Amino acid sequence: IVGGSVTPVESQPWQAAIYWKSSSHRTAFLCGGSLIAPCWVLTAAHCFADGQKTKANEVSVILGKSAINETDVMSEQKFDVTEVIVHEDFDNSQGSFNNDIALLKIRSETGQCARETKTVRTVCLPVANQALPSGDACEIAGYGKEKQGLWYYSQYLRTGKVELISQDVCSSKTYYGSMITDNMFCAGSPNWSTDACKGDSGGPLVCSVNDRMVLFGVISWGDGCAKAFRPGVYTRVSNYNSWIAKHMGQPSPKAD
Ligand code: 4AZ
């Protein structure tokens, strides 16, 4: 996150840290994610597009983590991944990421899913096709870079405030033009100071609705970080309610 501030994981308790265990048994930080149900983390498809990284047994997840290089056994919960479900229509061939969404099924060594604590809890999903007005303020979080070009990631979980940008503005020529599909939306800060950056992908963009934090976006892509007219681009989660329900093995919820 560029331009944000360090935050304890208690304020983003759905934040997941996703790791990749290579064949040489080295563990590397891969992406962010969000806990949407006790056994399920929602993240970005492009984190696993490498083919190589789609093997569930090479992926692990830690919840409740405030510092990326420190282990706090009291607040963290560690999981293996039993399923990596990448969206069937994920497409990175048009210069952007369309349908950049994936689900991970998590299971602890003792066969459990996540337990709710002060540092670990699920985030709400939006109602299907729910969209908020442009200009509404939301927040993003992650362990990604604090500036484009730095060779290291943030040591601590950070959060930043961004405002929703209308589809018309973001797909105008001064912004991203035709790279923006209906499955994406843009968000940035008015002076371009705050943005997601490398390493934040897969993580949450949450907005408050009736005093509940709702996961409207998955951090997906952008041209650099915190550049003028190049806001962060997010997967529009409210387009995927039935995809999520189908893959979590639940009947799709009725619209109210
Ligand atoms: C990345 O490389 C990335 N400024 C994520 C978000 C943004 C740019 C790059 C948005 O993971």
Image (tube, rainbow, N blue to C red):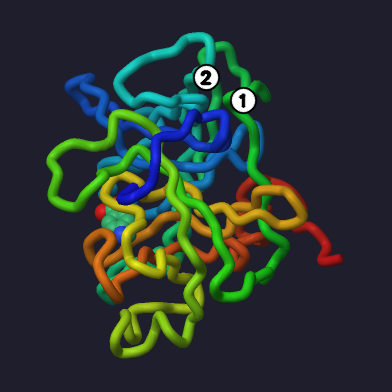
In the visual, does 194 lie left or right of 11?
A: left
Between 81 and 127, the one lying in front of the other is 127
Q: Quadrant of the C terminus?
A: bottom right
User: Residue 235 at what x, y percent from top left?
Assistant: 47, 63
Residue 175 percent coordinates (x, y): 32, 81
Q: Residue at x 25, y 66 (%)?
A: 227
- Which secondary structure lies at badge 2? strand
Q: Which residue is rendered at x = 55% and y = 24% of the image?
A: 107
Identified at 66% across, 60% down, the residue is 241
Q: How many marks?
A: 2
Is 79 left, or right, of 131 in this rendering? left
Q: Nearer the viewer, residue 191 or 29?
A: 191
* Vertical order, 162 against 1 (above or below): below
Q: Say what amino acid the circle numbered 1 marks.
A: Ala
Q: Of the residues under marks 2 and 1, which one precedes in the sequence?
A: 2
Amino acid carrying mark 2 in the image: Gln
In the depicted view, which residue is nearer to us: 7 or 217? 7
In the rendered image, which residue does mark 2 sit on?
Answer: 77
Quadrant of the rendered structure where residue 237 is?
bottom right
Q: Is residue 147 left or right of residue 238?
A: left
Query: Could you tell me if the residues under marks 2 and 1 are in contact, i.e. CB atoms within 8 Å?
Result: yes
Residue underneath mark 1: 114
